[in-house]
């Protein structure tokens, strides 16, 4: 393995480690936001009749009360709520 390939390999390992840390923090953040009444969980969305290619029935989202299809790390609704809190804090 030449030096470039080694650097790419090391960077991939670092990214994998960072994603694991982000997932841990995301999983810790929701209970704190719920406890402080800054967000409320949402009703599970309807499961589409024809599942999209990105749909992951093996994952579930705590923000959507355990609904399948995605996990909390990939929950756009939760990210939007957090973004609103950040924007409100700025104002």
Image (spheres, helix red, strand yellow):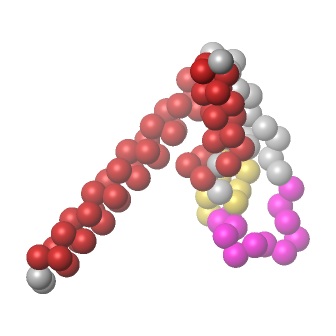
Give the x, y percent position of residue 14.
Answer: 27, 57
Residue 35 can be seen in this image = no
* Nearer to me, 67 or 14: 14
Question: Does 76 appear in magenta?
Answer: no
User: Picture quarter containing residue 33?
Assistant: top right
Residue 25 can be seen in this image = yes
Give the x, y percent position of residue 64.
Answer: 73, 43
Give the x, y percent position of residue 29.
Answer: 53, 31
| Farthest residue, direction left | 2
* Nearer to me, 23 or 81: 81
Above or below: residue 32 compared with residue 66? above
Q: Residue at x 56, y 49 (%)?
A: 73
Judge left or right: residue 1 versus residue 78.
left
Q: Residue at x 12, y 83 (%)?
A: 1
Q: What is the chief secondary structure element of the magenta stretch? A: loop
Give the x, y percent position of residue 87.
Answer: 64, 27
* Nearer to me, 24 or 2: 2
User: Picture quarter containing residue 84?
Assistant: top right
Judge left or right: residue 42 versus residue 87.
right
Above or below: residue 64 compared with residue 71? above
Question: Does 50 appear in magenta?
Answer: yes
Placement of the C terminus among the 4 image quadrants: top right
Above or below: residue 55 compared with residue 45? below
| Farthest residue, direction bottom | 1
Q: Residue at x 82, y 41 (%)?
A: 43
- The boundaries of the magenta stretch are 46-57
């Amino acid at each position: 393995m030449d030096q470039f390939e080694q650097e790419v390999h090391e960077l991939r390992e670092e990214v994998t480690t960072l994603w694991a840390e982000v997932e841990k923090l995301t999983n810790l953040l929701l209970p704190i936001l719920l406890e402080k009444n800054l967000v409320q969980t949402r009703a599970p969305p309807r499961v589409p009749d024809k599942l999209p290619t990105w749909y992951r029935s093996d994952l579930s989202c705590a923000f959507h009360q355990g609904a399948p299809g995605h996990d909390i790390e990939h929950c756009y609704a939760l990210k939007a709520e957090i973004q609103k809190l950040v924007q409100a804090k700025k104002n």
